[in-house]
Structure formats: structure tokens, C-alpha cells
């Protein structure tokens, strides 16, 4: 087991809060960020950036610059820091950190020259984004049962996502690459991607504008580039298409089921959300991105979530427990029902040709029909 990945844990000493550590494997060393999010929104949180000297499983990192932030992840200006200091809140300029891998957990110890800034030790597990889903599906097993169920749902309240294997956890394509450091992604990868795509798009997108940045990520996502977005749709039938689509010519997945997720977006939007992924507290936020250069978005009735959380299911379940509200549910359907499902979806007009305008979608749709 390596240090790379996302580690999330709770701390409690002079203050309490959430510690999030994102670590990337950088060939012969590790680099990443650690964010300390204080439970008291009136107190500053902290960002620390680090690089290790090797790929060892333990490191002592001294005098790391401490960047104070507010509860939303915006860096505190000097006048705000002076006001906090006048109220007796000491903010350390640097922090000393020791990390050590202990089995499947990461031990993190930190201290600062300022006593009121705190210190302590946290033993935190790596997030379980790459493990099997533990979400129990609704008692719906047949295609007819699915149609009856979704027909009775309130309109424009739920969004859906189809996955071809019921064991797969909800996870963005960014985290599926094994990467975790979203600051590196934003500063380096997005800059490279913007340069490469700029001659291929008709409209220059201003990435300092939140709406246009979301549209840029959505465009990249729909063309296969890893992003911290997760694709959803307003249509349960479009979600069913994506769940069954790639099973053509394959053996049924282990367990024999595809999965269609259902998220109560009306209720979920009442939970605290953020318009950026880094730095920001752990969140899953709904993004209805503009469809610049993206002719697939409208026929797919596309909507997205954006997140800085590797293990989305556990994050949502934690919020569910705190608020006593159910947001996320799943329906598993037999993979062997593919032929029936795809035939009926085609009669509804839900085909590759309609969802992927262009030659590729048309050819895929005709292959499905004729072969």
C-alpha cells in the first residue's frame, strides 16, 4: 500500500474538524496538499502543501508554510488575519508534520510554534472509492418494475446515472486514474488541456468565469478526459441506456446486474454546496453546466455533479445520517435483460443515434438494430 490517494479523518484537540490529505505519486517522491477544515466556521481553516524526499512510507516535514482560509476555502487577506490576531486567535506561519503508513491507515501528527494554533495526531483511513459499492438496491428487479417505478416519480426532482456493473462505486474519472491532488490538476493539467483544445473549439472560454469553467470541464468530460465531474441525466431511460449499452457482446458482470442510481436533487441542493473543488471542504455539488461545443448534452438531458471526494457514496451516506434524509438510492436490473431493454428504448427514441449526434452515434445505432 502506498501513500498516494485521498485520506479523510476527524481530529479533536483544542479544536475539532476534518482533515483531508490528497497525495499524488510523482515517480520517485510524493506531493500533495493537506486541508484542515475547522468545525467552527468563524475560525480559520488551513492549507499546507508538501513534497516528500522519497517514496518511503514515513516522512518528517518541517516548517511547511501554513495558508489560512475561511470556511469556503478562500484565502484570508492580511487585514482579516490582523483582526483575528487582535481577538487573540494565533495563526501559525508554519507547521511541522509527520506522516507514517500504519497498515491501511495513515498516522498524521502536526505541531506549530503557536500554541493556540493547535496540534495533534489523527489516524485516518484511505477513502474507499475503489472498493465495491455497499449501497443496498431498492426491491425492483425487472424492467417492467423499473418502468412502473420511475413513471410514478415526481418530475424534475431526481437525476439518474447508469453503470454497467452494480458493484461499481460512484467515482469520478479523475479519481479513477489514481490521482488525488486537485490543485495540481487545476494548475497544470487544465492549463495543458486548454492550450490543446483552444484551436479545436469555436469559442474561447474564460476559465476564470465559474460558468465557463464548468462548461469547459463538461466538454472535456464528454470527450473522455478525466475530470472531477460525474455525468447524470434527468431521464431514467437515458440512464438505463448507459447502464446496458456496453454489455453488447460481453458476459454479464459479476452478480449479473447493472445499476441505475437515483439522486434526489431537490433535497440534495438544500445541503451546503460549493462552486469550486479546490480548495474547498469535502462536497458533492450539482452542476448544470452550459453546453458550449457540446451537442450531446441536450439529447442526453445531461446534468453533472462536481466533487473533491473520492468516495462519493460514503460522503452522501454521512450527510444522510446527519440530516436523517435519504438522498441516494439504486436500482439493479438483470444484465440478461439487455435485448428487451434496448429494443424498448429504441422504440422510445433513446438510441446511440439520438444521444450521440453524428456518424459514430448513427453507426452504433444501426449496428444495434441490424446486428
Image (tube, helix red, strand yellow):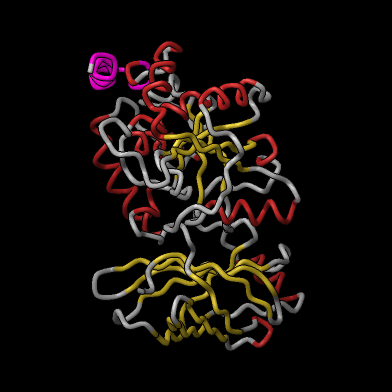
Residue 124 covered by magenta stretch = no
- Measuring 35% from the left and 66% from the top, which residue is drawn there? 24
Query: In this rendering, is residue 93 above or below 231?
Result: below
Residue 140 lies left or right of residue 161; in this view the side is right
The chief SS type of the magenta part is: helix
* Residue 315 percent coordinates (x, y): 59, 55
The number of numbered discs placed on residues in the rendered structure image is 0
Query: In this rendering, is residue 65 above or below 288?
Result: below
- Measuring 49% from the left and 72% from the top, which residue is drawn there? 48
- Measuring 28% from the left and 15% from the top, which residue is drawn there? 369
| Magenta region | 354-370
Q: Quadrant of residue 322?
A: bottom right
Query: In this rendering, is residue 190 above or below 217?
Result: below
* Residue 54 percent coordinates (x, y): 29, 81
Q: Quadrant of residue 234?
A: top right
Residue 366 covered by magenta stretch = yes
Q: Is residue 290 visible?
A: no
- Measuring 39% from the left and 85% from the top, which residue is drawn there? 58
Q: The C terminus lies in which quarter of the figure?
A: top left
- Which residue is at the front of the view, 294 or 194? 294
Q: The N terminus lies in which quarter of the figure?
A: bottom left
* Residue 245 percent coordinates (x, y): 35, 29
- Which residue is at the front of the view, 336 or 136? 336
Q: Is residue 126 visible?
A: yes
* Residue 257 percent coordinates (x, y): 44, 39
Amino acid at each position: 500500500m502506498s501513500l498516494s490517494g485521498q485520506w479523510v479523518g476527524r481530529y479533536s484537540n483544542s479544536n475539532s474538524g476534518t482533515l483531508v490529505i490528497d497525495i499524488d505519486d510523482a515517480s520517485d517522491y510524493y506531493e500533495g496538499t493537506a486541508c484542515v477544515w475547522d468545525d467552527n466556521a468563524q475560525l480559520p481553516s488551513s492549507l499546507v502543501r508538501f513534497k516528500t524526499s522519497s517514496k518511503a512510507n514515513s516522512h518528517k516535514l518541517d516548517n511547511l508554510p501554513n495558508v489560512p482560509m475561511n470556511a469556503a476555502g478562500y484565502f484570508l487577506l492580511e487585514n482579516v488575519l490582523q483582526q483575528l490576531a487582535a481577538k487573540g486567535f494565533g495563526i501559525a506561519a508554519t507547521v511541522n508534520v509527520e506522516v507514517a503508513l500504519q497498515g491501511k491507515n495513515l498516522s498524521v501528527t502536526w505541531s506549530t510554534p503557536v500554541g493556540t494554533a493547535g496540534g495533534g495526531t489523527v489516524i485516518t483511513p484511505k477513502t474507499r472509492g475503489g472498493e465495491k459499492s455497499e449501497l443496498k438496491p431498492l426491491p425492483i428487479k425487472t424492467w417492467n418494475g423499473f418502468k412502473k417505478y420511475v413513471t410514478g416519480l415526481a418530475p424534475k426532482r431526481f437525476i439518474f446515472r447508469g453503470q454497467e456493473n452494480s458493484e461499481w462505486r460512484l467515482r469520478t474519472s479523475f479519481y479513477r486514474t489514481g490521482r488525488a491532488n486537485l490543485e495540481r490538476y487545476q494548475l497544470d493539467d487544465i492549463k495543458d488541456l486548454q492550450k490543446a483544445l483552444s484551436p479545436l473549439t469555436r469559442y474561447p472560454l474564460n476559465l476564470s468565469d465559474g460558468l465557463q469553467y464548468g462548461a469547459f470541464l463538461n466538454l472535456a468530460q464528454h470527450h473522455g478526459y478525466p475530470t472531477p465531474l460525474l455525468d447524470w441525466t434527468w431521464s431514467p431511460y437515458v440512464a438505463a441506456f448507459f447502464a446496458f449499452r456496453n454489455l453488447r457482446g460481453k458476459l454479464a458482470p459479476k452478480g449479473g446486474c447493472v445499476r441505475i442510481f437515483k439522486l434526489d436533487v431537490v433535497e440534495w441542493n438544500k445541503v451546503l454546496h460549493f462552486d469550486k473543488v479546490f480548495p474547498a471542504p469535502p462536497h458533492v455539488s450539482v452542476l448544470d453546466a452550459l453546453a458550449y461545443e457540446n451537442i450531446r448534452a441536450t439529447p442526453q438531458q445531461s446534468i453533472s455533479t462536481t466533487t473533491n471526494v473520492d468516495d462519493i457514496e460514503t460522503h452522501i451516506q454521512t450527510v444522510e445520517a446527519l440530516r436523517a434524509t435519504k438522498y441516494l438510492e439504486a436500482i439493479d436490473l438483470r444484465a440478461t435483460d439487455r435485448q428487451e431493454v434496448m429494443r424498448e428504448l429504441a422504440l422510445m427514441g433513446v438510441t446511440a443515434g439520438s444521444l450521440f449526434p453524428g456518424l459514430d452515434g448513427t453507426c452504433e445505432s444501426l449496428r444495434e438494430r441490424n446486428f
